[in-house]
Image (cartoon, rainbow, N blue to C red):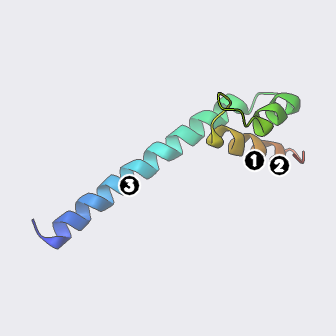
Amino acid sequence: MSFWEKAGKVAVGAAKKVAETASEWSEIKQRLEPLSNDELVRIAQDDGFFGKSSNERMIAKNILASRGVRV
């Protein structure tokens, strides 16, 4: 396999990963947007072991920022 074939496979793999991540973020955002500011603040500040994922916390913070709420 040539260098360019390998590079192409790596690029395709990276593109798939980016698409999966974007899809996951979009899914999380759609789930969190209808929540109240208080619920979003709880999610944004939840850093326990069994708490929300870092993506959920980040997206909750972004939604709050877009609403003009500082966390």
Callout 3 amino acid: Ala
Please state if 46 lies on the left or on the right of 69 as rendered: left
Give the labeled residue for mark 1.
Answer: 62
Please state if 52 lies on the left or on the right of 38 as rendered: left
Give the labeled residue for mark 2.
Answer: 65
x and y percentages locating residue 13 in the rendered image: 32, 53
Of residues 23 and 13, which is closer to you in this image? Answer: 13
Q: Which mark is residue 23?
A: none
x and y percentages locating residue 10 in the rendered image: 29, 60
Callout 2 amino acid: Ala
Q: Is residue 68 above or below residue 52?
A: below
- Which numbered disc, 2 or 3, marks the residue that appears first in the sequence? 3
Q: Say few, some or many: other residues with alpha carbon within 10 Å of mark 3 (under 14 / 14 to 19 / 20 or more).
A: few
Callout 1 amino acid: Asn
Circles 3 and 1, Cβ within 8 Å, touching? The answer is no
Question: Image point 25% across, 67% down: which residue?
Answer: 7
- Tell me the element at label 1: helix
Circles 2 and 3, Cβ within 8 Å, touching? The answer is no
Q: Which mark is residue 15?
A: 3
Q: Say few, some or many: other residues with alpha carbon within 10 Å of mark 2 (under 14 / 14 to 19 / 20 or more).
A: few
Question: Image point 74% across, 33% down: which residue?
Answer: 33
| Real-space Cα separation, disc 2 to disc 1, in angstroms | 5 Å
Question: Image point 63% across, 42% down: which residue?
Answer: 55
x and y percentages locating residue 8 in the rendered image: 24, 63
Please state if 34 lies on the left or on the right of 50 as rendered: right
Q: Residue 28 is drawn in which quadrant?
A: top right
